[in-house]
């Protein structure tokens, strides 16, 4: 089966600019997560969707980050305006089962560098 | 809180030596997952443990879930250079919380 698709793979912007990342999860996977992974650290959950509804966005910096999954399939993550500390890899993850009960499938990630 | 503590943070071994990473939680876990992330790559699922005291093996890898379901371990026997990477335990209870990971380096 096709994996989780993410784009762009790399993005370099200046602080205060905006950026958007796109994710297409594995077909049929209802659960989609966005994680932020800063170099040398473990992935940090930003937001979890179940179909097109938000399950958990408690760690999403809502003053600058937003995410949507309008039709319960593709998702976009936006940062506006970006800060230096947003430099990280943004991982999109899909899961067939809800509630973390099964295997997670990771995309290759979108590496953001904020200058 | 909801964190899982992983130790050690780094481990350097000579090829052929054994390696163990530990994951601890202050609260009972419904299940725990383990992932491996190669340098420059993304995390890849290794295994999920659900039952108290469960032990699972994958070739040279042995995974354990504690009797109280508050800790877990991953043991690699006779490490190889292909084992290099960061190993994460993941608390999966509603949402998914990653430990900080143990970075393994193997000297040939």
Image (cartoon, coloured by chain):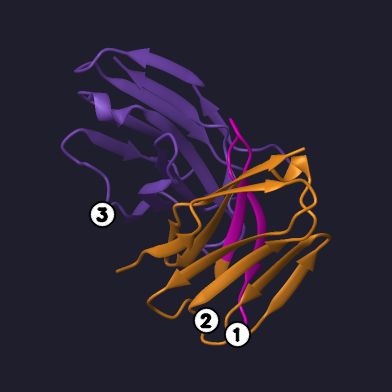
- Residue A60 in percent (x, y) is at 27, 45
Is residue A73 on the magenta stretch? no
- Residue B1 in percent (x, y) is at 29, 69
The chain in purple: A
Chain letter, disc 2 residue = B
B20 lies above or below A2: below
> Could you say which quadrant of the image residue B50 lies in?
bottom right
- Residue B58 in percent (x, y) is at 79, 62
* Labelled pair 1, 2 in contact (Cβ < 8 Å): yes
Nearest the eye: A79 or A44: A44
Q: Can residue A91 be seen in this snapshot?
A: yes
The kind of secondary structure element at disc 1 is loop
Chain letter, disc 1 residue = B
The nearer-to-camera label among 1 and 3 is 1
Instruction: Write down the residue under mark 1.
Output: B52
Q: Furthest-right residue in view? A: B59
Residue at mark 2 to residue at mark 3: CA–CA distance:
26 Å
Q: Furthest-left residue in view? A: A63
Is residue B106 shown left or right of residue A86? right
């Amino acid at each position: 089966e096709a994996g989780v698709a993410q784009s762009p793979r790399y993005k370099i912007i200046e602080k205060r600019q905006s950026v958007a990342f796109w994710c297409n999860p594995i077909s049929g996977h209802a659960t989609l997560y966005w994680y932020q992974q800063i170099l040398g650290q473990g992935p940090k959950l930003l937001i979890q969707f179940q179909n097109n509804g938000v399950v958990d966005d408690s760690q999403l910096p809502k003053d600058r980050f937003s995410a949507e999954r309008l039709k319960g399939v593709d998702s976009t993550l936006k940062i506006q305006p970006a800060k230096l500390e947003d430099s990280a890899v943004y991982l999109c993850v899909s899961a067939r089962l809800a509630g973390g009960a099964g295997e997670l499938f990771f995309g290759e990630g979108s590496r953001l560098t904020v200058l | 809180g909801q964190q899982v503590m992983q130790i050690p943070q780094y481990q350097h071994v000579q090829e052929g030596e054994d390696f163990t990473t530990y994951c601890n939680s202050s609260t009972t876990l419904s299940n725990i997952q383990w992932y491996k992330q190669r340098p420059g790559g993304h995390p890849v699922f290794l295994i999920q443990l659900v039952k108290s005291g469960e032990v699972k093996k994958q070739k040279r890898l042995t995974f354990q879930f504690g009797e109280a379901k508050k800790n877990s371990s991953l043991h690699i026997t006779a490490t190889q250079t292909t084992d290099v990477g960061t190993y994460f335990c993941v608390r999966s209870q509603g949402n998914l919380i990653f430990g900080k990971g143990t970075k393994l380096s193997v000297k040939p």
